[in-house]
Image (cartoon, rainbow, N blue to C red):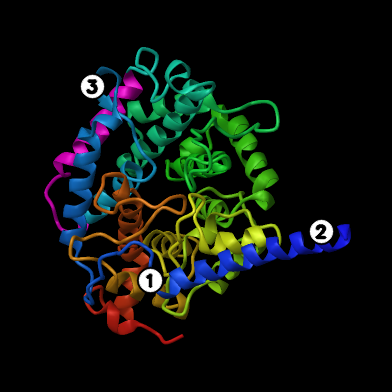
């Protein structure tokens, strides 16, 4: 009798699990995920992209939630950083005589916080947000400040940029398991930039920042010890990372020699291309997972976000933009068939508002809200970088294409 009761309980549990899975599949089949604007079928619009990025950066800098000490605002990985990297590229392409107002505001904010480093409050403090948030804030900010100013300076180093790098090296971990990395803001499992594994992503950004500095700085005796720690950390932790973090390392390795060897780079490129979807794009959520093995939990994760809402199953703006950009940075030829398909996906998926749509892999957000734009902000910045890559433009021109007829270059799967 007891055995029969045990068997019945097991059957009941299995039935509930199967029913839950069936409900998930039914929701997906009937399109119960939150509605998204339908992308217009056209070639991409540089002016619209610039207008969207400017407006979103203005909104971010004026948003009370981003306000910080002494009239400054915090720099975000989702809005401010992609903006800082992409907007100067659009400025040149659009033949604008000077940086936009929003770009100047951003750079001035970074410079002010660098100058006041020892007198200005952190993004978040232990008192307000809990243990380690002051250190995490300083570590995160030091890397973002150095990268933004290095990118802004191009091939020269201004005084504030050098000071920003000094702050960055001061914040580097020099002992323990995390030696070589930086303290990084963590808010639970908020992938891909504020999670418990985002410290690796931050170290990759630090490597990118050093890599775009002039060669004489990279060769400076004063930073060789720090570079050694950084390389050792990235190499030591590489195999344990999510694919999104390893993609960031591929980007860093294209800027700073000695992070990945050619075999490792090629293996990662092959892995990325293998996961491309039939339409030329990539799905975001699986790139943020630390995949271990198939289980009921991993199966459910394919269909549900951590908050229990149905995860988007279509190609994503951020995933496609980031991967196309990094593949180009890693030296994949722009006439590569799969890369052409990715660039074509980007060219035809810009919305009328000028952005590329992406949604959080963590929770369902209202797309019209400020936080609902965060992932699309990042997608737009990296889409611009991918589409405006000089190697891409030169290659497309050599093949008789241009950014204005890129859609016609789509290659069937």
The residue labelled by disc 3 is 71
Residue visible at 76% across and 63% down? 8
Q: Give the side of residue 305 with respect to residue 260, left or right.
A: left
From the top left corner, tell me how far across and down residue 134 is, in percent: 47, 21
Residue visible at 62% across and 34% down? 180
- Where 357 falls versus 29 (above or below)? above
**Quadrant in the picture for the N terminus:** bottom right
Q: Element under label 1?
A: loop
Report the disc number at residue 31: 1
- Where 100 falls versus 90 (above or below)? above
Q: Give the side of residue 370 with respect to residue 361, left or right.
A: left
Nearer to us in this view, 212 or 249: 249
The residue labelled by disc 2 is 6
Image: magenta residue range: 92-115
Nearer to us in this view, 398 or 51: 51
Residue visible at 47% across and 44% down? 193
Q: Element under label 2?
A: helix
């Amino acid at each position: 009798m007891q055995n029969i009761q045990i068997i019945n309980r097991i059957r009941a549990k299995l039935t509930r699990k199967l029913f839950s899975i069936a409900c998930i599949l039914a929701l997906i089949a009937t399109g119960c995920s939150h509605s998204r604007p339908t992308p217009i079928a056209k070639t991409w619009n540089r002016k619209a992209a610039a207008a969207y990025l400017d407006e979103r950066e203005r909104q971010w800098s004026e948003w009370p939630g981003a306000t910080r000490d002494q009239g400054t605002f915090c720099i975000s990985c989702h809005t401010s950083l992609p903006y800082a990297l992409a907007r100067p590229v659009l400025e040149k392409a659009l033949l604008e005589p000077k940086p936009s107002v929003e770009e100047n505001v951003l750079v001035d904010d970074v410079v002010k916080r660098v100058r006041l480093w020892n007198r200005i409050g952190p993004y978040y403090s232990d008192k307000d947000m809990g243990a380690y948030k002051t250190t995490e804030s300083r570590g995160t900010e030091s890397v973002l400040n150095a990268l933004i100013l290095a990118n802004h300076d191009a091939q020269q180093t201004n005084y504030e940029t050098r000071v920003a790098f000094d702050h960055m090296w001061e914040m580097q971990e020099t002992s323990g398991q995390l030696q070589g990395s930086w303290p990084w803001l963590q808010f639970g499992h908020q992938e891909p930039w504020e999670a418990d594994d985002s410290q690796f992503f931050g170290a990759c950004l630090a490597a990118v920042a050093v890599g775009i500095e002039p060669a004489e700085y990279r060769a400076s005796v004063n930073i060789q010890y720090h570079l050694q720690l950084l390389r050792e950390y990235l190499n030591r932790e590489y195999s344990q990372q999510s694919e999104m973090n390893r993609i960031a390392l591929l980007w860093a390795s294209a800027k700073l020699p000695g992070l990945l060897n050619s075999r490792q780079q090629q293996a990662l490129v092959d892995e990325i291309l293998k996961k491309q979807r039939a339409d030329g794009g990539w799905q975001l959520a699986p790139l943020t997972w630390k995949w271990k093995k198939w289980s009921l939990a991993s199966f459910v994760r394919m269909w549900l976000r951590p908050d229990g809402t149905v995860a988007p199953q279509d190609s994503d703006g951020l995933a496609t933009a980031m991967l196309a950009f990094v593949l180009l940075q890693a030296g994949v030829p722009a006439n590569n068939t799969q890369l052409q398909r990715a660039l074509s996906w980007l060219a035809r998926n810009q919305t009328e508002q000028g952005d590329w749509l992406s949604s959080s892999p963590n929770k369902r957000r209202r797309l019209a809200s400020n936080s609902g734009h965060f992932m699309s902000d990042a997608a737009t910045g990296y889409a611009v970088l991918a589409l405006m890559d000089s190697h891409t433009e030169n290659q497309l021109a050599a093949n008789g294409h241009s950014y204005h007829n890129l859609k016609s270059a789509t290659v069937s799967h």
